[in-house]
Image: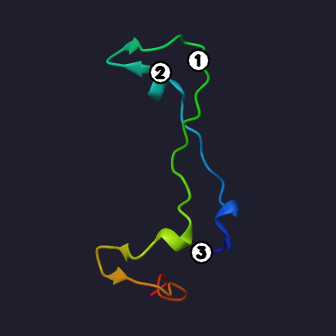
Amino acid sequence: MSCAIGADIPIEERDGDEVRIINGHYICPPDTPVYNPSFDITPHNLITAIVTENAIIKPPFTGKLRS
């Protein structure tokens, strides 16, 4: 909630072997470079609603997420 823009959110990177290994076997050379982010940032103009266990929140989102 304290980040004004998505670019300010740090993206955690996960272990590359989560992508390189399937069923205990490498599907590519072990040293293959991998970008494996834990999540991505969706541009706000592509979000039409946020669905939670309590409500469906529609734009404008300002102030609605805290409540």
Mark 2 Cα within 10 Å, few/some/many (few <14, many 20+)? Answer: some
Which x, y percent locates residue 65?
47, 82
Element assignment for label 3:
loop
Eyeballing the image, is 66 above or below 34?
below
Q: Residue 36's x, y, as percent?
A: 54, 36
Q: Nearer the viewer, residue 57 or 54?
A: 57
Q: Identify the residue at image location x=55%, y=42%.
A: 37
Q: Callout 3, which amino acid?
A: Met
| Mark 1 vs 2, N-terminal side | 2
User: Residue placed farthest to the left in the image?
Assistant: 53
On the image, the x and y values in percent for residue 24 come to 36, 15
Spatial CA distance of label 2 from label 3 is 34 Å
In the figure, is residue 64 to the left or right of 2? Answer: left
Rounded to the nearest angstrom, the CA distance separating label 1 from label 2 is 8 Å
Instruction: Tell me the residue at 60%/14% (across/down).
Output: 31
Nearer the observer: mark 2 or 3; the answer is 2
* Secondary structure found at label 2: helix
Asked whether the residues under the numbered discs 1 and 2 touch, taking CB atoms below 8 Å apart as contact, a structural biologist would say: yes
Badge nearest the viewer, 3 or 1: 1
Asked which secondary structure carries label 1, the reply is: loop
Instruction: State the residue at coordinates (54%, 27%).
Output: 16
Q: Amino acid at mark 2?
A: Arg
Location of mark 3 (residue): 1
Instruction: State which quadrant residue 54 falls in.
Output: bottom left
Tell which of 24 and 41 is nearer to you: 41
Side of 34 relative to 50 (left or right): right
What's under tag 1, amino acid-wise?
A: Thr
Using the image, tell me which numbered label, if any, was put on residue 32: 1
Q: Which residue is mark 2?
A: 20
